[in-house]
Image: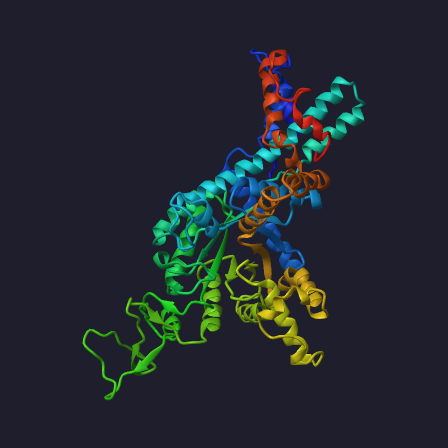
């Protein structure tokens, strides 16, 4: 979606400006053209505008065919995002359908100057914008490194007097180069304050490059991770105001196609901070109030001094209130509240996508809710959190067991009911293999059957880093020592074609050499000579 000028066009424009082929200072037009091509985006706001169009196009493709779902992994550094997208490009030959998810949980836990903190909006909110900026710097540098390699190839071909066809082939690869820049879905938590604070922060995230903001209907100052207890939701009109704040931020900055994901935590939230004011029956407030847990006021149960009471369905009732002032919802009403939340967010808040936070990964559960939402909004679409908070193995094995018992395939005593199902002894059983098969097709199933446009994993790089570091440390500080590093990391990098094995090149040493040559010619002191140890890897991972 980035309408970059072709290399030949840029070179021709420069040649017209500098007919002698160089500036008065001796800089050649080819060198200027290279830098212009390598600078794939002028600003990060341009990235937001371009990536919003990418998302809109992907959403339209999904509406046409739900097999066209998209995916992302949550990344807590620019390097994680860069390596993920490079891997996707190496695997698929394209980055299409791959995004980056920016998790507020990981910002709080890993990018927080106050320390490692839980996902409760205690991190400084500017850290979110900083991470978006960092991710796009890293993705753009991946562009620069890859394009610099192509230009090196072009220079070499010219020096060796390659055929016109060979030169044109290289130029075509430069012109058709697909950027590593992809959409970021950025977690703005509950907005870090009131609607105006939400708007101000949204602008910072968008200016950093975010084309998509995900915001949840929890209370800002009582925000909890979606998979923790004690969640408190806000009345729907309060949430709609924050959705509008995000839309205004997009519109003000000219990101007309900006995408908003409205997340509801109502499925697991049993509390609300305040009772909204209802103006008439059936309005947003009354539809929210009806779910409050109450008890009727009577002669035997009279109202007390300084107690809050309301009239509901013609009866005087007392909402159940905790010592901290929070109000309780009726038990087992979360699902109904989710449906109403989603419809309101789409029809009155202008949200583009939904996010329903669930406590287990269950395709049928999500599909059931989506089908009800689609009775009102036929093209309703979701992002779904394939969360590491789920015990995927246990959940899927339990689902298979329950399905097979219902179908009469097995008896209850054939497999245990509880956590014993996690045992490795079930890995190669029919049940274990079926659960793994369902895991492999889970994202396809939930996308084609339950309206999920975007599948993400919130915290994969958190767990990956912990597990990989543990694996290396166990071997390195154990008996394997150096073999542990070589066997678990370097050999795999080389054999898979992971470009980071040439770590100097990965962080731009060749870019530096090229620039030194541009300004210094033969005087350039280059790092990539014969004594550079990266040469030991030959053409590995190029």
**Residue 452 lies in quadrant:** bottom right
Whether residue 8 appears in this view of the structure is no
**Residue 217 lies in quadrant:** bottom left
Q: Is residue 75 left or right of residue 7?
A: left
Residue 535 place in picture, x, y as percent: 69, 26
Give the residue furthest to the left: 305
Residue at image point 51% right, 60% down: 355
Q: Nearer the viewer, residue 495 or 421?
A: 421
**Residue 305 lies in quadrant:** bottom left
Whether residue 457 appears in this view of the structure is yes
| Colour scheme in use | rainbow
Question: For the C terminus, which image quadrant?
Answer: top right
Residue at image point 60% right, 11% down: 523
Residue 213 place in picture, x, y as percent: 48, 51
Residue 14 lies, with reference to residue 96, above or below; the image says above
Q: Nearer the viewer, residue 306 or 253?
A: 306
Q: Nearer the viewer, residue 503 or 63?
A: 503
Q: Nearer the viewer, residue 220 or 468?
A: 468
Question: For the N terminus, which image quadrant?
Answer: top right
Q: Is residue 429 left or right of residue 385?
A: right
Residue 381 lies, with reference to residue 18, above or below; the image says below
Residue 362 place in picture, x, y as percent: 59, 68
Residue 317 place in picture, x, y as percent: 29, 80
Q: Is residue 115 left or right of residue 11?
A: left
Give the residue furthest to the front: 479
């Amino acid at each position: 979606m980035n309408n970059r000028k072709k290399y030949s066009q840029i070179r021709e424009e420069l040649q017209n400006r500098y007919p002698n082929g160089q500036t008065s200072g001796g800089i050649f037009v080819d060198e200027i053209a290279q830098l212009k091509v390598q600078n794939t985006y002028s600003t990060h706001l341009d990235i937001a505008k371009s990536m919003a169009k990418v998302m809109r196009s992907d959403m339209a493709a999904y509406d046409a065919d739900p097999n066209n779902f998209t995916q992302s992994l949550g990344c807590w550094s620019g390097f994680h995002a860069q390596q993920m997208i490079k891997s996707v490009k190496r695997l698929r030959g394209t980055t299409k359908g791959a995004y980056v998810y920016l998790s507020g949980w990981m910002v709080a836990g890993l990018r927080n100057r106050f320390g490692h903190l839980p996902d409760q909006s205690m991190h400084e909110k500017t850290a979110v914008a900083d991470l978006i900026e960092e991710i796009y710097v890293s993705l753009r540098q991946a562009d620069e490194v890859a394009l610099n390699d192509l230009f090196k190839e072009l220079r070499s071909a010219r020096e060796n007097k390659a055929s016109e066809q060979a030169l044109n082939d290289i130029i075509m690869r430069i012109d058709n180069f697909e950027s590593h820049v992809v959409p970021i879905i950025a977690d703005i938590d509950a907005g870090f304050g009131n609607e105006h604070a939400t708007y101000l922060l949204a602008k910072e995230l968008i200016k950093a490059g975010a084309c998509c903001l995900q915001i949840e209907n929890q209370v800002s100052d009582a925000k909890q991770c979606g998979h923790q207890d004690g969640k408190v939701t806000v009345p729907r009109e309060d949430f709609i105001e924050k959705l509008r704040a995000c839309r205004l931020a997009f519109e003000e900055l000219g990101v007309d196609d900006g995408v908003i994901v409205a997340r509801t935590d109502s499925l697991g939230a049993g509390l609300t901070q305040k009772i909204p004011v209802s103006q008439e029956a059936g309005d947003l407030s009354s539809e929210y109030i009806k779910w409050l847990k109450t008890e009727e006021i009577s002669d035997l149960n009279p109202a007390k001094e300084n107690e809050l009471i309301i009239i509901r369905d013609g009866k005087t009732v007392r909402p159940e209130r905790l010592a901290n002032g929070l109000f309780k919802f009726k038990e087992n009403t979360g699902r109904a509240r989710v449906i109403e939340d989603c419809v309101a967010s789409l029809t009155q808040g202008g949200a583009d996508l939904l996010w329903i936070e669930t406590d287990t990964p269950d395709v049928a559960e999500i599909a059931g809710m989506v089908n009800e939402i689609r009775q009102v909004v036929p093209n309703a679409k979701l992002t779904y959190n394939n969360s590491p908070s789920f015990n995927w193995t246990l959940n899927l094995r339990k689902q298979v067991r329950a399905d097979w018992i219902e179908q009469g395939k097995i008896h209850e005593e054939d497999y245990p009911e509880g956590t014993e199902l996690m045992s490795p002894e079930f890995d190669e059983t029919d049940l274990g293999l079926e659960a793994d098969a369902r895991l492999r097709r889970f994202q396809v199933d939930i996308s084609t059957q339950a309206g999920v446009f975007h599948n993400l994993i919130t915290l994969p790089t958190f767990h990956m880093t912990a597990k990989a570091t543990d694996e290396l440390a166990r071997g390195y500080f154990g008996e394997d020592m150096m073999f542990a590093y070589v066997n678990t990391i370097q050999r795999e990098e080389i054999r898979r074609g992971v470009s980071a094995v040439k770590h100097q090149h990965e962080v731009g040493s060749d870019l530096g050499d090229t620039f030194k040559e541009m300004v210094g010619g033969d005087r350039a002191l280059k790092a990539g000579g014969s004594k550079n140890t990266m040469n030991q890897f030959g053409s590995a991972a190029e």
